Amino acid sequence: MKRIFTLFLSLLVLLPTLQATLSTTRIVPTDGSVNVDINARVIVMFDKNIEVLNGGCTLNGEALTPSIANKMATFILPCLDYSTTYTFVAPAAAFSEKGNTANASPEVRFSFTTKARTQPEARLFDAIVAPDGSGDYTSVQEAINKAPENQTKPWLIFVRKGVYNGVLRIPSSKPFIHLIGEDVDSTIIQEKICCDFLVDGGYTGSRDPEFVAQWKAYVDQFATGRVKNSQGQDPMAYIDAKNFYSENITYNNRWGSEDRDYPQALAIRCLKDRTAFYHCRALSYQDTWRTPDGDGSRQYIKDCYIEGNVDFIYGDGDAYFENCQINIIKNHKPTEEAGWIVAPSHSGTPWGYVFKDCRLTSEVAGDSIYLGRAWIASPKTVFINLELDDKIYLRPEGWDSHFGNAIPIIFADWHTHYANGEMVDLSQRNNWYWYLRDVGDTIQGYAQRYITDEEAAQYTYSRIIPASDGWRPDLMAERLPAPVLNLVGGTTVKWEAVPFAICYEVRKNGEFVCFTTETSYTADDANARYQVLAVNEWGGRGNLSDYATALHQTTMGNAVLLATEYYDLTGRRISLDDNTGRRQLVLCKTVWSDGKVQVEKQIR
């Protein structure tokens, strides 16, 4: 009896420990789930309040960082692909009961498969703008004015080649405007306007009498800066709407690009969240590009060209510049100072400005340049893997120590290098900043100036842009593969449907002919050179096909295979060496020495 009583007491002592075992109560998505949205999150619920212990959670081997709220760990996932299986792993002791590290979590492991991409509905562009009258409108602004309000899906406007003079104004009531140019070098929206002189020559700058007099004399010399119909706004392109997307358009403020002088002369200003640009150009001198206001605003800029000299990328929000060219121009007046790329003003913004794999070029060799300077609030900017051309003289300190009323949080660059691969010495980068709050009252502070390899790896598109609403402008910027053309009887051009295309653009001798939702086109000239490209659901125009003509139709003959490339059905290039061993349907593109390009579906 005594032995039984002793055993009973031992069990009573162990009972709290047994009851304290941390366990999961719910997992989202559940193990084995299919048709999971590509913007899904992973949620792991426990039976007790938790905290991170050892961490180490991964999705297909990529590290994840959880957000903890009481009993729940939530993971914002990297950008997921369609029709792909993912495995989530939280190793044992990744978490513990809050305040009790002895009570650690067990391993959590499960898999799920994302849904297949849905074929979008076939449709044409909603409007075509052409300066010769062959489209629906001759003015880009007219096409904007006639677009419906409060859209919930893209309103596609195709802008033919030409120079469109006049300011661009997109009001907040017109979200989802997608402005698609025919060719970035020859589709140009431009005007000459600056920030101090508006419709009637009205002055908006400092009210100091001496300053007013100086600028009055200045505007008398540059009366062309007064722009009619600017609607009280001074940027060349003023975009006050969410979900704006543009590609293949040059935005040129002639005040800056031609006169190369002050004051501010914005080419682009966006005010709202979820704006994106692909393969566009922005030209001016001071304050070329102003990013959206607000700490929740995001902007994605890919493969773009931005030109200027003074603080020519500035403002607020999280802005991700990917594979862009940043070009410095100068006016070489005696009073000309060094150039500055960025002048941020971030307030509560998680990431700030991120420049990833960009190139810094200069019009003239030897002119000095700063990466940037602090404007107001708490600026954040990093340059990741920045390439410098041989004309650039980037100051060793990197960042100017004084400008506005701010001490930056982080001004840093990582793996900055020249085109030949030579690394730039970052040892003299500045980390001390100051400004005058009042007369004689100097505010000083320090900012982070270096980032480690591990920190640099955190600055990814997946972490910065999609956020909680799953916004995916990277898909808008993806190019669909080129159609494979065939001739039928010398008069009809046919092609196989390209997955996820809404329509096709037909070109004759390099010039636009029409859009069609069909997979054939009856040619009016059997000897002309016809080409076709596919258009994705956001209006993005894909890769251009080979020619299909009686004279230029290519044959295999003695041609040599130059390259073989593989794409998934979304048009994203893939490596078959990276797959998991499962068979999949892919697009195989072959390039031959005689100019022939073939695309066919294969099971690999």
Image (cartoon, grey):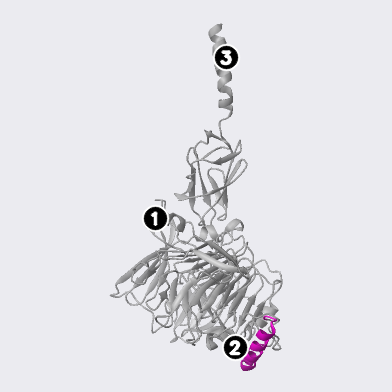
- Relative side of 154 to 449, left or right: right
Q: Amino acid at mark 1?
A: Asp
Asked if the residue at tag 3 contacts the one at tag 2, i.e. Cβ–Cβ closer than 8 Å, the answer is no
Q: CA distance from mark 2 to mark 3?
A: 92 Å
Looking at marks 3 and 1 on the same chain, the residue that comes earlier in the sequence is marked by 3
Q: Image check: 134 left or right of 532?
A: right
In the displayed structure image, the side of residue 413 where residue 515 appears, left or right = right
Q: Is residue 153 visible?
A: yes
Of residues 164 and 291, the one drawn nearer to the viewer in this rendering: 291
User: At 57% from the left edge and 15% from the top edge, which residue is drawn?
Assistant: 9
Q: Nearer the viewer, residue 339 or 422?
A: 339
Q: Which residues are magenta?
A: 205-227
Q: Secondary structure at mark 1?
A: helix
**Mark 3–mark 1 CB contact (< 8 Å):** no
Q: Main secondary structure of the magenta part?
A: helix
Residue 221 lies in what quarter of the image?
A: bottom right
Indicate the position of residue 321 as horizontal and vertical percent values.
51, 68
Residue hosting label 1? 578
Screen quadrant of the C terminus: bottom left
Position of residue 557 measured from the top left corner of the image (x, y, whole percent): 30, 75
Which of the two discs, 2 and 1, labels the residue nearer the N terminus? 2
Disc 2 crowd, CA 10 A, few/some/many (<14, 14-19, 20+): some
Mark 1 neighbour class, 10 Å CA radius: few under 14, some 14 to 19, many 20 or more: few
Residue that label 3 marks:
8
Q: Amino acid at mark 2?
A: Pro
Helix, strand, or loop for circle 3?
Answer: helix
Residue that label 2 marks: 131
Looking at this rendering, what residue extends furthest in the front direction?
440
Q: Nearer the viewer, residue 285 or 68?
A: 285
